[in-house]
């Protein structure tokens, strides 16, 4: 376990004792940067955007401000529940994305919209189709071997992430997000606290200890349903199983009204938990679909993140869809209402984009 004494934390810990040098460096550098800055992230930023997909070295954010986001979000949803060829294609596409981001000096965070491995219904909970898969895939469950096979595929993929320098690329792995809601099959209504913790611990242990994956930083992030530290930690698997804590919050940030004091309070809880426990903290998902508020970037997002003395290593907004005319969370060329304020957000010394990062994989 990597331990570094720090004035702002009792102990800064990376849970993988065998983590690669680049993973340790990323972990420590994210912590250092979070004291004065937050990296800006965008889901699927370089895979697709508003009206396009698959273009080399393109992102809507870069087209607007001249730099990619500092953090690029990808997803492992295509790694199971599909044909062998589709799975291989998904692995190849995400592998290239991760490696390209690393070679440019950016950071990758991984979510996992895991297709239900024991029933229909996809990753969402569908009353007429879904089964509460957690109890089936944890140790002792009838689909445990199926789950191990899926994890082996992720582990093998993780080993294949080789940068141009020959090093294995570090990534932030954020499985089973928004687990406090009921919309995903791993959500709180569909498994007990003990079952969820068992799932988390087995996932980390199998990847780290059985598959020898040493380039993952493990992130724990509920949605925004908590109001106290105790509620935030209700399904927390323990300090030895988590590197980063975060929160997904769309509702308080404009989707369901502007509840900025409430959003700030919750984000402060996340930051305080991280400082107390020697973890990184992040605003792991947020955004306002279609960005109808022309000052959302500085008047809402930046205001919340800077309202208290919080240490947040990154903030990530959701994707820009290729086909939908309304499903986008970052400005694109031509989206004039949001661009001026986004440029102010970009220019603010607090926010970091990919072009601002220097040697984040070196100590």
Image (cartoon, rainbow, N blue to C red):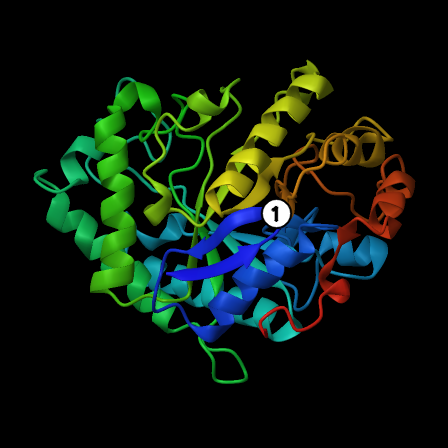
80 lies above or below 57: above
In the image, is 16 to the left or to the right of 210?
Answer: right
Give how far across and how far down residue 73 sits, in percent. 56, 51
Crowdedness near tag 1: few (<14), some (14–19) or many (≥20) residues, C-alpha within 10 Å: few
Q: Is residue 334 left or right of residue 275?
A: right
> In the figure, is residue 161 to the left or right of 265?
left
Question: Residue drawn at (77%, 58%), measured in percent from left and top?
Answer: 62
Q: Nearer the viewer, residue 151 or 10?
A: 10
Is residue 230 at least partly visible in the picture? Answer: yes
Q: Position of residue 164 (x, y in %)?
A: 54, 83
Quick one: SS at disc 1?
A: loop
Q: Position of residue 189 (x, y in %)?
A: 31, 18
Looking at the picture, does residue 257 appear above or below residue 211? above
Does the rendering let one see residue 249?
no
In the rendered image, which quarter contains the N terminus? bottom left
Of residues 41 and 64, the one nearer the viewer is 41
- Who is closer to the viewer here, 64 or 224? 224
Q: Dividing the picture into quarters, in which one does residue 317 lie?
A: top right
Q: Classify the position of the C terminus by image quarter.
A: bottom right
Relative height, residue 49 to residue 182 (above, below): below
Which residue is located at x 34 percent, y 47 percent?
Answer: 241
Total marks shown come to 1
In this picture, residue 183 sits left or right of residue 58: left
Query: Does residue 26 sit above or below 277 in this rendering?
Result: below
Q: Quickly name the residue at label 1.
A: 8
- Residue under the point 28% across and 58% down: 207
Residue located farthest toward the bottom when viewing the structure as drawn: 165
Report x, y in % for residue 134: 22, 33
């Amino acid at each position: 376990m990597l331990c570094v004494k720090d004035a702002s934390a009792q102990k800064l810990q990376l849970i993988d004792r065998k983590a690669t040098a680049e993973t340790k460096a990323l972990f420590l550098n994210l912590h250092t940067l979070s004291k004065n800055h937050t990296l800006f992230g965008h889901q699927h930023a370089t895979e697709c955007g508003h009206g396009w997909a698959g273009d080399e070295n393109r992102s809507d954010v870069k087209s607007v401000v001249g730099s990619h986001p500092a953090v690029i979000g990808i997803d492992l949803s295509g790694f199971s529940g599909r044909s062998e060829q589709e799975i291989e294609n998904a692995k190849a596409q995400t592998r290239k994305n991760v490696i390209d981001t690393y070679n440019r000096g950016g950071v990758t965070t991984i979510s996992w919209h895991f297709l239900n491995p024991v029933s229909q219904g996809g990753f969402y909970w569908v009353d007429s189709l879904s089964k509460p898969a957690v109890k089936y895939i944890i140790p002792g469950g009838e689909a445990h071997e199926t789950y191990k096979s899926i994890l082996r595929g992720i582990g093998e993929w993780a080993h294949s992430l080789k940068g141009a320098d020959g090093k294995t690329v570090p990534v932030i792995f954020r499985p089973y997000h928004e687990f406090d809601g009921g919309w995903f099959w791993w959500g709180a209504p569909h498994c007990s606290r003990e079952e969820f913790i068992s799932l988390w611990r087995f996932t980390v242990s199998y990847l780290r200890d059985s598959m020898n994956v040493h380039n993952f930083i493990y992130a724990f992030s509920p949605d925004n349903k908590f109001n106290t530290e105790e509620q935030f930690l209700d399904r927390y698997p323990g300090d030895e199983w988590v590197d980063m804590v975060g929160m997904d919050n769309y509702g308080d940030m404009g989707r369901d009204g502007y509840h900025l004091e409430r959003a700030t309070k919750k984000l402060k809880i996340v930051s305080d938990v991280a400082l107390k426990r020697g973890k990184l903290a992040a605003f792991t998902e947020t955004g306002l679909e279609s960005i109808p508020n022309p000052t959302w970037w500085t008047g809402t997002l930046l205001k919340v993140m800077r309202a208290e003395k919080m240490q947040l290593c990154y903030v990530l907004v959701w994707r820009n869809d290729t086909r939908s005319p309304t499903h986008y969370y970052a400005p694109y060329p031509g989206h004039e209402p949001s661009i001026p304020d986004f440029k102010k957000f970009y220019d603010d010394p607090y926010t970091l984009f990919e072009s601002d990062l220097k040697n984040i994989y070196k100590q």
